[in-house]
Image (cartoon, helix red, strand yellow):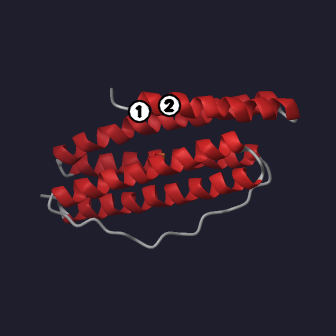
Amino acid sequence: MLLKNIEKALNDQIRIEAESSQIYLAMACWAEVKGLEGVAGFMYDQSQEERDHMLKLVKFVNERGGHAKVSELSEPNVTFNSFKEMFEKLFEHEVFVSQSINELVHITLQEKDYATHNFLQWYVSEQIEEEAMARTILDKINLIGDDKGGLYLFDRDIQQLTITSASIDTPQ
Ligand code: OFO
């Protein structure tokens, strides 16, 4: 059984994951209309992953005797000055999500809700991976600078990153 304050905190996280999915979908669209197909594909996948994170929380809340809430979402930013700026925003957003997960973990410890605490460990690991991935991408972008050829190669390489992470995620 979920305590009311834990249910509320989990529902807040459901909204954050849903908003993350929308933010990344908007980034995918921006990249696609700019002709960055690799980046667009990567962002569509990220958007889908965030939806999966949301659904995992939804199922948990409902299974634990709570009621998952489907909230109204804020409209994401849809344009960026550069793809570097877009990835900076992505990184900032992941840091924000990590903070939110940490807060949630903290509440479960205060309330001695070890079942939810255990469930949330998956999100803690996921955030470490996602922040690391965003940092790696930003490092690459900084190396490229204004080089157009570099951007072309980056757009091609990021497709590879998507394929690799998809094969890691697929259960054997
Ligand atoms: Fe939901 O993992 Fe990123 O934000």
Nearer the observer, 76 or 164: 164
Position of the N terminus by quadrant: bottom left
Nearer the observer, 42 or 81: 42
Q: What label sits on residue 169 in the rendered view?
A: 1
Residue 29 shown left or right of residue 105 in the figure? right
Above or below for 6 versus 149 = below
Residue lying furthest bottom: 72
Above or below for 40 versus 131 = below
One can see residue 91 in this view: no
Q: What label sits on residue 109 in the rendered view?
A: none
**Residue plotted at (73% across, 32% down):** 154
**Residue plotted at (87% across, 36% down):** 146
- Circle 1 — which element? helix
C-alpha separation, residue under disc 2 versus residue under disc 1? 6 Å
Residue 36 shown left or right of residue 97 in the figure? right
Q: Is mark 1 within 8 Å of ligand 1?
A: no
Residue type at numbered disc 1? Asp
Residue 48 shown left or right of residue 133 in the figure? left
Could you tell me residue 37's position as x and y percent? Answer: 70, 43
Nearer the observer, 93 or 133: 133
Residue 105 shown left or right of residue 165 in the figure? left
Could you tell me residue 122's position as x and y percent? Answer: 33, 38
Which residue is denoted by mark 2 in the rendering? 165
Nearer the observer, 101 or 103: 101
Residue type at numbered disc 2? Ser
